[in-house]
Image (cartoon, rainbow, N blue to C red):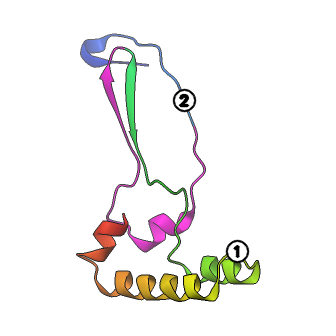
Amino acid sequence: MEGANGLLCDGHLGFLGIDQCLIEEDTATEFFKTNVCADNKVLFAMPALTCSHLSNEDRDAFARRNVMTANCLAVADIQCDRCCQDKEGMQADHQ
């Protein structure tokens, strides 16, 4: 691939599966970034979780599979409501 000053560089191509909900929830945020830091280092920035846990579909799936207790589901509901209402504060913290 072409590098700086017309130089050719070896490169790699990688793919990462992501949940479309991340992008649907916030189209303004750039969730995935890559920077070349040195000759042999690449820095990847991405969400710690590969999917969003704000959607009702995810919450319902957890409830159906008995993965979370009723208390955990209630906390998830409260946090989701707070995050969706407060775009500047909690939503930024969630990201």
Q: On the rendered structure, is 61 left or right of 10?
A: right
Q: Which residue is mark 1?
A: 67
- Residue 15's place in the image compared with 20, above or below, is above
Q: Amino acid at mark 2?
A: Leu
Location of the C terminus by quadrant is: bottom left
Q: Is residue 62 magenta?
A: no
| Quarter of the figure with the N terminus | top left
Q: Secondary structure at mark 2?
A: loop
Residue drawn where x is 57% and y is 62% of the image: 19
Q: Residues within 10 Å of mark 2 (few under 14, many from 20)?
A: few
The reply to whether dot 1 and dot 2 touch (C-beta < 8 Å) is no
Q: Residue 92: which quarter of the image? A: bottom left
Along the line of sight, the residue nearer the viewer: 16 or 41: 41
Q: Residue at x 37, y 83 (%)?
A: 84
- Left or right of residue 40, residue 90 in this image: left
For residue 86, what is the image quadrant? bottom left
**Which residue is the site of mark 2?**
13
x and y percentages locating residue 42 in the rendered image: 39, 27
Q: Is residue 22 magenta?
A: yes
Name the residue nearer the viewer: 89 or 29.
Answer: 89
Residue at 41%, 48% in the rendered image: 32
Q: Amino acid at mark 1?
A: Val
Residue found at x 53% / y 72%: 53
Numbered range of the magenta stretch: 15-39
Dot 1, how many residues are within 10 Å of its Cα: few (below 14), some (14-19), or many (20+)? few
- Label 1 and label 2: CA atoms lie apart by 35 Å
Q: Nearer the viewer, residue 81 or 39?
A: 81
Where disc 1 sits, the SS reads: loop
In the image, is residue 1 above or below residue 23? above
